[in-house]
Image (cartoon, rainbow, N blue to C red):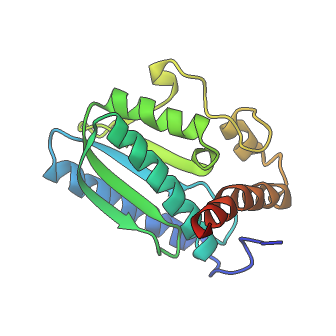
Amino acid sequence: MIDIFSQGEPQNVITVLANKDWRNQQQQFLLRQNQHATLLSLKLNIPGSIKNNDYLSNLFVQGYQQISKQLKLANCIVIDKVLQVKRATGPEAILVIDTTGEQLKKISIQFEDESKLGRIFDVDVITQNNTQLSRTQLGYSPRSCYVCGANAKVCARSQCHSMQLIKNFLNKIYRDEISQNEIKNNC
């Protein structure tokens, strides 16, 4: 059985916070360069110290391809992007899209709620005035926990699920999504 956390370089809080600063700088630069566009920032929502390896990169790429298809179906035009699949702190993408923040947030909510891979992504929509749109601003319920279905922020804050339970869930997502795609591609 595959354990997607069996490899990778552990990251510490300092590195993760430095990466958050890097992401914010990238976002601000892209907003300045594209004054009438909206940003879509994607990363995996992976707890623990292992943030990237081949397994996690594969999960990210598959999810990235899924949301890219949704964007194309909605006639959203990607103007620019920063794609960093091999970052030690986890794969990330920042897309500059010619559409409204509301439309982009609705697409991201659909991805997060309806795709198994979308459930493990952290998808942020940032408008030109540097406002991050939330689900509740558009009348949607808060994000649900991918383990139990309760409010994800409450579960994360209270750490009500063991790290092993979360890892087991993520391993199952990998087996269900990536392994099945590999089988289909080899037939």
Q: Quadrant of the N terminus?
A: bottom right
Q: Quadrant of the C terminus?
A: bottom right
Q: Residue, x 64% and y 80% (percent of image)?
A: 8
Residue 25 placement, left or right of 105: left
Residue at x-position 54% and y-position 71%: 14
Residue shown at the point (25%, 34%) measured from the top left: 99
Q: Is residue 151 above or below residue 92?
A: above
4 up-or-down from 124: above or below? below
* Farthest-out residue, front: 187
Q: Is residue 68 visible?
A: yes
Which residue lies most toward the top here?
139
Give the quadrant of residue 158. top right
Which corner quadrant of the image does residue 51 belong to? bottom right
Q: Nearer the viewer, residue 67 or 131?
A: 67
Q: Position of residue 43 (x, y in %)?
A: 50, 56
Residue 107 drawn at (x, y percent): 43, 34
Q: Is residue 51 visible?
A: no
Q: Is residue 144 above or below residue 28?
A: above
